[in-house]
Image (cartoon, helix red, strand yellow):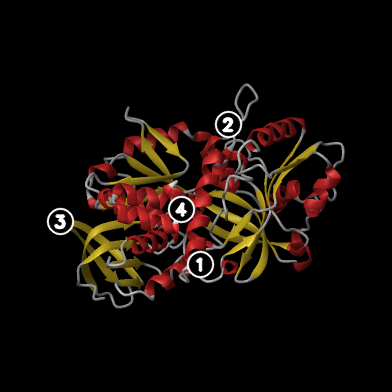
Amino acid sequence: MNLNDDCDVALIGAGIMSATLGMLLRKLDPSLRIEAFERLDRSAAESSDAWSNAGTGHSGFCELNYTPAKPDGSVDCSKALRIAEQFAQSLEFWNALIDSGDLPAAATFLRRVPQMSFVEGAAGVTFLRERHRRLVASPRFQDMEFSEDAARIAGWIPLMMEGRDPAIPVAATRMERGSDVNFGALTRSLFAALERQPGFALHLGHEVGGLQRDGDRWRVEVRDLATGTGRSVRARFIFIGAGGYSLNLLERTGIPEARGYGAFPVSGQWLRCTNPRVIARHHAKVYGQADHGAPPMSVPHLDTRWIAGKQELLFGPYAGITTRFLKQGSWLDLLRSIGIHNVRTVLAAGLANLDLTRYLVGQAMLSEEDRVDHLKRFVPRAESADWEFQQAGLRVQIIKSDGKGGGELKFGTEVVTSADGSVAALLGASPGASTAVSIILEVVERCFSEKWASGEWRERLGRVVPSTNR
């Protein structure tokens, strides 16, 4: 496909969101001409990469920040229930693509890894017991196990129980059918499937600059980073799934819906286990309770993952301060994101979240010894020689106008669309990739509303995401 030709859809960014949208649209209308543009030399190299994700396989099973305790002692499980439904939709879509031959075998990106929550102390045990009682009432959680028996828990996670003070009460929940998803591998498989089809082109090493109205289309200005050559493509619909750079690109469209947003970047780091014997003794994703003031991406977990066919063990993530919006971005990203349209929003949110800023500064100043001390809360007998520092990804949280001259820091993913449905952008972070299908369904429903309601699209959608027609 020639870059100077018109296309129906332009995807900006080659991460899991663009890959999911591209594949879904081709399933709904195989005649669509789609082009994708990525500034790096491979797809899924930023937030979707396996080493960048703060969590893989978010399904609400183990993330305690999705089930906050109320003042009366009850537990609000609504977010966990919603995310479990959304992850189930992702599984539906991936399984349909495996059955159709678009995706390779599930084991190339999806493995069974139990998901657990772990707490200690009387208050923590009481909270987890109530959380379990409420969650098992849902069919999505009915097989969740709960135990306060240290010996039983040691059978699940021996690495975490050895050396722990027996006088301190502990509790854990376990979902044996939890998942580990390598979103980097999944994304690259989705793009490979799209590239096998006519009418699709993925352009790596191409950076998008200008986005301008051109009649009933958008003109997307693109520069080949290898040659420096600038070109353009006209598209009826543009999707901005460029991670931390999405807000900047959205603002370039000039649509009114882009006004009033700001961005707050948070960096992440891991401790990565290097001892194969230690790695082999832990097979679970275990989430604990976050420190006071910690952002959602910093909920501590001891995480079994499969990357490039090899079992890995990570602990963290540790948060930190950065001014970059991407790992391969500029230190000026934050400064450049502030303008007359959002300066009040950003400043108001900053003043309202000074505790978070102090927390991030403290995290950034942690020494190697401090990080290992945090690890020992999970693995009491951890040896520093068995762990090394690993840079994780960046997350750019949304700052949104409250409509009163102030701003609110939002944790989550937000879909922004133009009134005419010709532009869509994703802002924010967690749970992100695990709920990609649900998020992209929202994009398609908003931006292709007439076709979405048609019998033909409903029938085709039901083949790949059956729950949408229930």
Query: Mark 1 or 4 closer to N-term?
Result: 1
Q: CA distance from mark 3 to mark 1?
A: 37 Å
Q: Position of residue 167 (x, y in %)?
A: 87, 36
Q: Are discs 3 and 2 less than 8 Å apart at CB?
A: no
Circle number at residue 459:
none
Circle number at residue 466:
4
Quadrant hosting residue 243: bottom left
Identify the element where label 4 is drawn: helix
Instruction: Give the farthest residue toward the top.
Output: 72
Residue type, mark 4 in image = Pro
Q: CA distance from mark 1 to mark 4?
A: 15 Å
Q: Is residue 321 above or below residue 181?
A: above
Q: Position of residue 125 (x, y in %)?
A: 74, 34
Q: CA distance from mark 4 to mark 2?
A: 28 Å
Query: Mark 2 or 1 closer to N-term?
Result: 2
User: What residue do we see at 30% from left, 48% from top?
Assistant: 453
Q: Nearer the viewer, residue 458 or 106?
A: 458
Query: Would you name the residue on which mark 3 appears?
Result: 216
Give left or right: position of 245 versus 159.
left
Query: Mark 3 or 4 closer to N-term?
Result: 3
* Mark 1 vs mark 4: in front: 4
Identify the element where label 3 is drawn: loop
Circle number at residue 98:
1
Circle number at residue 76:
2
Give left or right: position of 29 versus 71.
left
Identify the element where label 2 is drawn: loop
Q: Is residue 34 above or below residue 453?
A: below
Q: Nearer the viewer, residue 388 or 60?
A: 60
Residue type, mark 2 in image = Asp
User: What residue do we see at 74% from left, 46% from top?
Assistant: 377
